[in-house]
Image: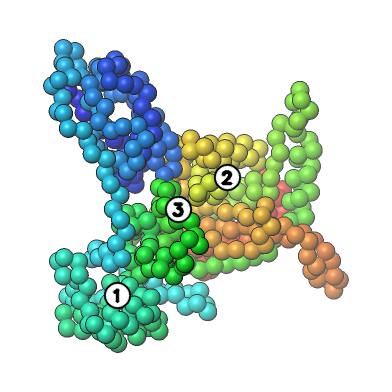
């Protein structure tokens, strides 16, 4: 009986991918383990191996086809004595990406939105809309009065994102006014549906609404690729469902810069006279942050619904910019590695990330992240947490600053570090403690070796 070759799931979250290349053609014989195709996801390009031996009877999905769903049949493998005539004739139709819908209904299980105080940065779960008051019919139509619809449109608010308090959950004038004033939070978009809509929350403006604001011919419209859709969806999910708060410290890095210079100067040279390694400031940051998470283990945490995961290892992800988006490859057990090992691993991961050659296990998991924009001259910024991590450390550029010491004015090199915390897993005092340990290690790098 012919064997179906299906689109594999290359990661737990993968729903579709691009069939980038076939390494075989119809009629070719293959053995178990032979590479037959290349699959491209938003994160990587992976090789697909044959799991059985036989002959390629039919290729059902053409090379270069986008949006091929996981488990869709992409080819048929014939076993000994079987003929291609026995294979069903119709070819698998390449799935079409659904167009974004301005009023896509959010599932009832969507996480409750988070109300954030813009002045203090404190967050608290918003009250959920009453479960017994549905706001949509079975067909997905929003129940709203004509006046409420007009007011919502004028305010640029998607009426489907407003919780109705009228009869049977109907959205009325007062609901729109409450949403405009911020007294009533808008509904959060369900994370599971975000990729299908290009990562745009239900309360955001639709494509047509945005385009209508600009003169035709004054822009270039470029469709989002898989990576940009996933980045948008994950970061939207993070800001809507993770209660962020931020802690900032200035770190004096004179000792670090001196240590870095000495270590790099001692690096052996190869035949071409180039040093065997060159440590960066970020290598010290990765090491210090990994050790800090070990010394304050309660901060090495991940929120998991009704539980919190306290990680035994410091698996630290590093944000890597790539064309069209970013990767966060993970340095496993970062605290146990030498500065040189961290440097070599980060360089290797970054190089392969830019060419989409990372395996899923190299960019999934981890307990925290480091994002460094110092090389771009950025002094200070607050990063968005990368779910399911509990924290992310944002590091700015080192610069000379004037500071007082024992009644004297001195000049030193300083670096600003900002820690973003998931308030559900890491409280303020805990975040301050782990950031303080990081500061101590950065300012006294010799302590990283103790």
- Give the percent coordinates (x, y) of residue 311: 45, 50
Which residue is under mark 1?
159
Q: Residues within 10 Å of mark 2 (few under 14, many from 20)?
A: many
- The answer to whether residue 213 is above or below residue 197 is below
- Give the percent coordinates (x, y) of residue 337: 59, 39
- The scheme the figure's colours follow is rainbow
Which residue does the image show at 64% across and 45% down from the upper left?
Answer: 283
- The answer to whether residue 447 is above or below residue 119 is above
- The answer to whether residue 397 is above or below residue 123 is above
* Dot 1 and dot 3 residues touching (CB under 8 Å): no
- Give the percent coordinates (x, y) of residue 351: 57, 37
* Residue 400 visible, this angle: yes
Work out whether mark 2 precedes mark 3 in sequence or the reverse, and give the earlier one: 3
Work out whether mark 2 precedes mark 1 in sequence or the reverse, and give the earlier one: 1
Secondary-structure class at tag 2: helix
Which residue is under mark 2?
335
- Give the percent coordinates (x, y) of residue 245: 50, 68
Which residue is under mark 3?
222
Q: Residues within 10 Å of mark 3 (few under 14, many from 20)?
A: few
Asked which quadrant contains residue 49, the reply is top left
Which residue is more in the foreground, 217 or 98?
Answer: 217
């Amino acid at each position: 009986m012919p064997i179906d070759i299906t689109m594999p799931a290359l990661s737990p979250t993968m729903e579709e991918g691009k069939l980038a290349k076939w390494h075989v053609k119809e009629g070719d014989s293959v053995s178990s383990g032979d590479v037959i195709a290349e699959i491209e996801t938003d994160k990587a390009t992976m090789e697909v191996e044959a799991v059985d031996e036989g002959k390629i009877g039919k290729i059902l999905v053409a090379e270069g086809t986008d949006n091929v769903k996981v488990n869709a049949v992409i080819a048929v493998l014939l076993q000994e004595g079987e003929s291609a005539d026995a294979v069903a004739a119709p070819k698998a139709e390449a799935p079409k990406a659904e167009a974004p819908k301005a009023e896509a209904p959010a599932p009832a299980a969507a996480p409750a939105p988070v109300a954030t105080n813009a002045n203090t940065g404190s967050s608290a779960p918003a009250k959920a809309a009453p479960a017994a008051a549905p706001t949509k019919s079975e067909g997905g139509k929003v129940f709203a009065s004509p006046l409420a619809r007009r007011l919502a449109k004028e305010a640029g608010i998607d009426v489907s994102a407003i919780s109705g308090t009228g009869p049977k959950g109907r959205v009325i004038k007062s609901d729109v006014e409450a949403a405009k004033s911020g007294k009533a939070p808008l509904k959060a978009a369900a994370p599971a549906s975000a990729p299908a809509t290009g990562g745009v929350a239900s309360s955001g403006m639709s494509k047509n609404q945005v385009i209508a604001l600009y003169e035709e011919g004054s822009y270039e419209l470029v469709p989002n690729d898989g990576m940009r859709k996933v980045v948008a969806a994950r970061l939207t999910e993070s800001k809507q469902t993770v209660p962020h708060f931020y802690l900032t410290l200035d770190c004096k890095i004179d000792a670090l810069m001196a240590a870095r210079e000495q270590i790099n100067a001692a690096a052996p040279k190869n035949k071409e006279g180039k040093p065997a390694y060159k440590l960066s400031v970020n290598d010290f940051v990765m090491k210090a942050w990994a050790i800090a998470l070990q010394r304050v283990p309660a901060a090495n945490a991940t929120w998991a619904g009704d539980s919190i995961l306290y990680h035994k290892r410091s698996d630290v992800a590093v944000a890597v910019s790539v064309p069209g988006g970013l990767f966060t490859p993970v340095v496993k057990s970062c605290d146990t590695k030498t500065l040189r090992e961290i440097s070599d691993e980060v360089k290797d991961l970054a190089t392969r990330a830019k060419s989409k050659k990372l395996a899923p296990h190299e960019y999934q998991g981890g307990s925290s992240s480091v994002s460094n924009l110092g090389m771009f001259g950025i002094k200070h910024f607050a990063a968005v947490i990368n779910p399911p991590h509990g924290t992310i450390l944002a590091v700015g550029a080192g610069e000379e600053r004037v500071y007082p010491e024992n009644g004297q004015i001195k000049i030193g090199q300083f670096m600003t570090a900002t820690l973003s915390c998931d308030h559900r897993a890491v409280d303020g005092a805990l975040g301050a403690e782990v950031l303080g340990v990081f500061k101590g290690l950065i300012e006294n790098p010799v302590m990283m070796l103790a």
